[in-house]
Amino acid sequence: MFSSKSASASAPAPAAPPAGRALHLLSYDDAAKKFTLGEDALACLRGVRGPVGVLAVCGRARQGKSFILNQLASVARGRDGFAVGPTVRPCTKGLWIWSEPVPCVTAEGERYSLVLLDTEGVDAYDQTGQYSTQIFSLAVLLSSLFCYNQMGGIDEAALDRLSLVTEMTDHIRVRAAMEGGEKSGPGARRSAADASDLARFSPSFVWLLRDFYLDLADGTAADYLESALRHVPGDGPGVAAKNAIRDSIRGLFPERECFPLVRPVNDEAQLRDLSSVPRADLRPEFRRGLDDLVSLLFSRCRPKTVGRDVLNGPALAGMAKQYVDAINDGAVPAIATAWQSVAEAECRAAAE
């Protein structure tokens, strides 16, 4: 776990990103019942030759994920960015990336390119549970920083919605099962060793609480998060299920942070179309919080790694293809196995 107190000093501020556009990275073909990767988005990733990081924002539909990403991309008011809309109909379908990666520098002085990843809202009315888990899992697999966006505080209902983390551990492996051995599909039982290995490949985690109004008293947001993740006392299947969710979040995201953000405006009409509201009309507390959030997210980002290997753009594109192919084949994405295939392909390409 990390604290946000030194966030602004932990890494240099990123350079202002150039203008760009949203590219569809992942979509679902209803006719073929398969996921497909967008060629324009893959070409964008392959064009990043140096180290690459991925900042993903995920959460429920219609709760402002794309608005946050547009702030990170520094999209000017009135220009196209990640789709934001005022209705209950979800705007983002599948996974999208911003076409111009943000130039960043780590606290150690390492330069890298940061890709912004927008995700379809989980548990939307037109989704199945399996589809939500697959979208959530792919966002976690591809990201080096995973921001979970939600409205309000962390209560039992909020934790229950993050049961996707528990389900996700049945949809990701570190290594593929041996042929003829352990079952490898989404319903397969995982070994304890494999589950604990998964945390080594997990992104940093920021739980963003929107329209937050609770008084944290003398505690910090980090204290609030850790308190919410403590075990619920008692026995029985209900208590066990609640604690399983808490264990999954703590286990999968050992580096975690919580950030509260107040309501941006009081006018309901403005809330429905927040992207069109001039910055000067936003509440001062929200503007300050938004600036702090952007600084925190950029400072927490780092290049995407698999073990000790730092990924570049072509490798990230290759990993995305490996993961999607596995899901389409009814298998479980295996991180180390996918990386081995990508690394071998990169070596062959370099030798040609």
Image (cartoon, helix red, strand yellow):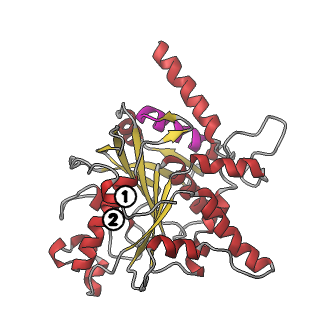
**Total marks drawn?**
2
From the top left corner, tell me how far across and down residue 96 is, in percent: 40, 52
Q: Quadrant of residue 71?
A: bottom left
Task: Give, as a three-letter code, the residue at label 2.
Answer: Leu
The residue shown at (28%, 50%) is 21
Q: Which residue is the extreme one toward the right?
A: 180
Report the front residue among 34 and 211: 211
The residue shown at (71%, 39%) is 176
Answer few, some or many: residues within 10 Å of disc 1's Cα (few below 14, many 20 plus, some between 14 and 19).
many
From the top left corner, tell me how far across and down residue 222 is, in percent: 48, 70
Task: Give, as a three-letter code, the residue at label 1.
Answer: Leu
Location of mark 2 (residue):
293
Answer few, some or many: residues within 10 Å of disc 2's Cα (few below 14, many 20 plus, some between 14 and 19).
many
Location of mark 1 (residue):
297
**Mark 1 element type:** helix
Q: Is residue 203 left or right of residue 269?
A: right
The residue shown at (56%, 58%) is 253
| Visible residue check, residue 205 | yes
Q: Which residues are magenta?
A: 311-325
The answer to if 47 sits in the magenta stretch is no
Q: Is residue 282 left or right of residue 27?
A: left
**Mark 2 element type:** helix
Answer above or below: position of 337 versus 211: above
Q: Which residue is the extreme one toward the front?
A: 218
Q: Is residue 99 left or right of residue 205?
A: left
Report the front residue among 1 and 17: 1
Disc 1 from disc 2: Cα separation: 6 Å
Circles 1, 2 touching at the beta carbon (< 8 Å): yes
